[in-house]
Amino acid sequence: QVQVVESGGGLVQAGGSLRLSCAASGSTFTFMNYGMGWFRQAPGKEREFVAAIGWSGSSTYYADSVKGRFTISRDNAKNTVYLQMNSLIPEDTAVYYCAAGRRLRIRIGTREGEYDYWGQGTQVTVSS
């Protein structure tokens, strides 16, 4: 059983910052063997890709909508991936999900179907 748990969401004013954390664990789960990703789903919209990172942290990829404002990183010693979100805008309001993909250790995944384990999500609300 693999557990993926997000934290760090909340209410912030436009222009502000938040840092999301995602801790992954399991009896047979080796964090370094997984690529990690963040997705988000706004009310009335489909879930969309936000950012992804390879096993070492040296490879990252971002959706155009967040490029230059969000930064994904990981700490393999803590089995945790982070999403630093700066210059937030109301359009960033969504439930943010963290996901782990065992086939994404080296290559970056931007599609939901490439990920095997998902968290329950954390709400981010940006007020104008």
Image (tube, rainbow, N blue to C red):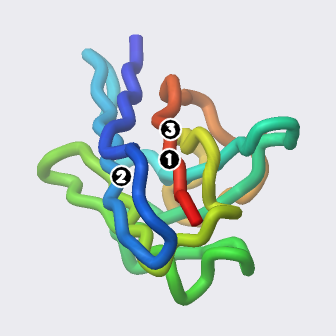
The residue identified by callout 1 is: 124
Q: Residue at x 15, y 47 (%)?
A: 78
| Disc 1 to disc 2: CB gap under 8 Å | yes
Describe residue 34's horizontal placement relative to residue 51 as left or right: left
Residue 20: numbered disc = 2
Q: Give the amino acid type for the residue marked by disc 2 in the picture.
A: Leu
Q: Secondary structure at mark 2?
A: strand
Residue 73: numbered disc = none
Cα separation, mark 2 vs mark 3, equals 10 Å
Q: Position of residue 108 (x, y in %)?
A: 63, 65
Q: Give the amino acid type for the residue marked by disc 3 in the picture.
A: Gln
Q: Give the amino acid type for the residue marked by disc 1 in the picture.
A: Val
Sooner in the amino-acid sequence: mark 2 or mark 3: 2
Q: Secondary structure at mark 1?
A: strand
Residue 90 in sight here: yes
| Disc 1 to disc 3: CB gap under 8 Å | yes
Q: Secondary structure at mark 3?
A: strand
Q: Residue at x 49, y 51 (%)?
A: 36
If the image is split into quadrants, where does the N terminus sit?
Answer: top left
> In front: mark 1 or mark 2?
1
The residue identified by callout 3 is: 123
The local crowd at label 1, few if under 14, some if 14 to 19, many if 20 or more residues have their Cα within 10 Å, is many
